């Protein structure tokens, strides 16, 4: 049986604790906790008369806008290449369903890739990420793993990359992407590149898409859940340049979800055309994500954690190996202790396919911006958001918790 | 490879023909071609700030309202029994993914059941429907087929029923449902009862849900696409009383679509509470569907077709066997001729699992109400909608086409 997605499950668990009056620091869920841009609300409201099923691939306007979105990011794209859906998760599932072969994953990687592969009865091959950044497997280990897997009778077919990455909050550099794609190409893999965090690179470093390296063999998925904080709108889109792959995906889409809701097609068309207010909103969100992720990173490193510096999105992936001396033997045990004793909710690395014995976990920093729309707008507009009282208080809660655990509490 | 859903595909094909200026009678797609109730538009507009992912099962308010919806229809239901999703199609897919065993289908039945089973690698066993109504297999033939299938090594596990039915537009009577459920129960099947047309029974005859016959072994799916003409909103909900089945469904949901979009949860909560204006809208829609389906039925029977009288929804399933004398040997050939020579778009019975040689097809009558919101509101408010010029013109187009085919054209 497929378990309830670990990220969604911890979100529901932590929300229930809060509803019960517990003081909980919610670092468990990658929801971009920010308000809806007013112009987006207006577009949705103005599209409420749209009740037709429409085309499975999406509306002409939304596809055209999505093509422009990719084209402006160095990936020339036609409207015909685009498929919209209720979430990029649904697209990833549909693509895994139609792309043949065993699934190769970076380790750690987002919880749903392996779960989707399991649901589809597909074998998964995990390859550790390099020290420099997550979201891609170490190229040399990938090469060896693929060669070894074939010898063992496996048939690696799809390599999923996350650029930038969840859970590590890092961005694989252009050279690293190039090396990984060279290996993938040599082994005849199709790359499924999840680029949902692409617009949230903190210092606007270049994102090298695998689609630029292996244009004929890369499918890119993205969505509006992270850059625009529209998780609850469920808007995903994919760039699928090969007609036969697109036709196969549309077949699955037509039998599982039919289409992205018609009013949401208008939201997609509006946002993906990237008018100035949308760009300004994403710019402000990116700056806030960066400031808070850095502040949380500082707390973890001050507590002795080994942790890559955050480069994109709103995640950290600290390793608290020093705590093994305090009697912790698995990441899950440590995560449970942090939640039960110190009210800090994080997800153990094992949920992301990492070694269960490692004292690593994913920390999502995006639900620290406030408890209501007013606080969140203040955070978005603040030149120094980590000094806002509610954010400073959360950082203090984390500091005290880490210090207590280090003291054996 | 899973083909593009036949119903969605013909919709896109016919819309393209219309856009190209062709005069096409669109009888191919089960979209309830009616406008959005203004109060529903207001609810969606007022919910545009809702951007949280929320619980996979759906919001507390929407689940409570859905429980009330079922309870008022003779199926006592708790909010905990409910799962919402982006469309009942997604729920049917998720349920098929988690309910074990081969899939037993009435023949003919809606296009997506067999396609979903194929996508999940599941065996399908088709059993013809009785003369009296579609949506359920003939009970005696079902019993024989299940016994025979087991002897051949099959493991029938799930029986899908459609009450009322698409594609035949009929309602299996209480006695027939009881007999079918007795057979299903004796063979240990789980019944998946698709009741999306339940509110559209023309004369308000009692709908006997299989869930009343086999309460422990029936899952019911429904949605707002048909009764409220909100296909493009993609709102589905299911009644899954067994906790272990619900947990399994939620596992799949969490890895494929996450949740029904948050703004749509508010629409579901509003509609499923069934305030007076919602009931009045459904009443008016039902009367319109009934009037037009009856008028189209009259055209087909006048042309010599054998066709069950419409009882629910907006479908007919005529058999034009007399046309075999004119050289037609398959339903697909006849459907193609009707479209290419006479501009009448219907789907051949083979798309619904029927005998390809039969000259049967599904006729959807719900896109005849008008080309714009003004015409559609007029149709909804008309005491005698078939006399409205645009509907009368469509009926004339159909009459001329059938007459021409009978004349060998």
Image (cartoon, coloured by chain):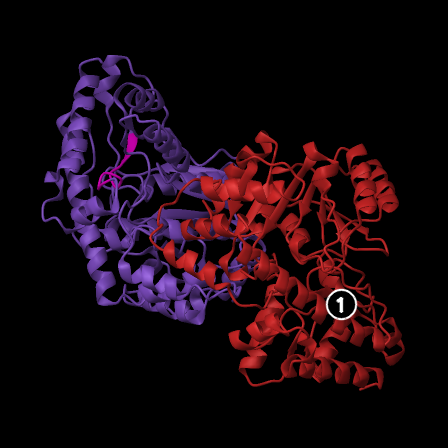
Chain colours: A red, B purple
Let me know if residue B364 is in the magenta part: yes
Which residue is found at the position 71% from the left and 69% from the top? A291
Front residue of this view, candidates B198 and A217:
A217
Front residue of this view, candidates A16 and A34:
A34
Q: Position of residue B157 (x, y in %)?
A: 48, 48
> In this orientation, does residue B267 appear?
no
Is the residue B69 above or below the residue B128 in the image? below
Left/right of residue B146 with respect to residue B325 in the rendered view: right
Q: Position of residue B8 (x, y in %)?
A: 40, 37
Q: Quadrant of the N terminus of chain A?
A: bottom right
Front residue of this view, candidates A20 and A308:
A308
Left/right of residue A200 with respect to residue A181 in the rendered view: left
Q: To which residue does mark 1 refer? A: A361
Left/right of residue B384 with respect to residue B275 in the rendered view: left
> In this orientation, does residue B379 appear?
yes
Q: Position of residue B76 (x, y in %)?
A: 33, 68
User: Which element type, helix, strand or loop, lies under badge 1?
Assistant: strand
Image quarter for residue B314? top left
Q: Position of residue A255 (x, y in %)?
A: 47, 42
Q: Which residues are magenta?
A: B361-370
Q: Quadrant of the C terminus of chain A?
A: bottom right
């Amino acid at each position: 049986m497929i378990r309830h997605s670990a990220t969604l499950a911890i979100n529901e668990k932590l929300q229930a604790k809060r509803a019960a009056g517990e003081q909980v620091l919610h670092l468990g869920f990658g929801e971009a906790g920010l308000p809806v841009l007013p112009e987006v609300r207006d577009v949705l409201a103005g599209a409420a008369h749209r009740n037709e099923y429409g085309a499975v691939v999406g509306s002409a306007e939304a596809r055209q806008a999505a093509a422009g979105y990719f084209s402006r990011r160095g990936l020339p794209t036609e409207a015909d290449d685009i498929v919209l859906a209720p979430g990029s998760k649904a697209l990833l599932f549909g693509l895994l369903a139609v792309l043949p072969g065993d699934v190769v994953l970076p380790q750690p990687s987002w919880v749903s890739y392996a779960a989707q592969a399991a649901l589809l009865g597909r074998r998964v091959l995990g390859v550790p990420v390099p020290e420099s950044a997550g979201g891609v497997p170490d190229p040399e280990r990938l090469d060896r793993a693929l060669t070894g897997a074939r010898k063992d009778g496996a048939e690696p077919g799809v390599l999923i990359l996350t650029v930038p990455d969840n859970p590590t909050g890092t961005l694989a550099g252009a050279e690293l992407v190039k090396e990984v794609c060279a290996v993938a190409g040599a082994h005849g893999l199709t790359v499924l590149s999840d680029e949902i965090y692409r617009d949230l690179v903190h210092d606007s470093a270049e994102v090298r898409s695998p689609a630029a390296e292996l244009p004929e063999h890369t499918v890119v998925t993205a969505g509006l859940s992270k850059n625009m904080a529209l998780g609850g709108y469920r808007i995903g889109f994919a760039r699928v340049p090969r007609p036969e792959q697109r036709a196969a995906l549309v077949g699955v889409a037509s039998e599982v979800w039919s289409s992205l809701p018609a009013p949401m097609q208008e939201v997609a068309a509006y946002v993906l055309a990237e008018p100035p207010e949308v760009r300004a909103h994403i710019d402000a969100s990116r700056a806030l994500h960066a400031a808070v992720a850095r502040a949380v990173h500082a707390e973890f490193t001050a507590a002795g954690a080994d942790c890559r510096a955050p480069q994109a999105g709103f995640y950290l992936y600290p390793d608290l190996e020093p705590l093994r001396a305090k009697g912790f033997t698995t990441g899950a045990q440590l995560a449970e202790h942090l939640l039960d004793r110190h009210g800090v909710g994080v997800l153990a690395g094992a949920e992301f396919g990492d070694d269960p014995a490692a004292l690593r976990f994913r920390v999502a920093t995006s639900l620290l911006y406030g408890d209501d729309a007013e606080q969140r707008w203040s955070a978005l507009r603040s030149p120094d958001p980590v000094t806002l009282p509610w954010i400073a208080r959360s950082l203090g809660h984390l500091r005290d918790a880490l210090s207590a655990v280090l003291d054996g509490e």
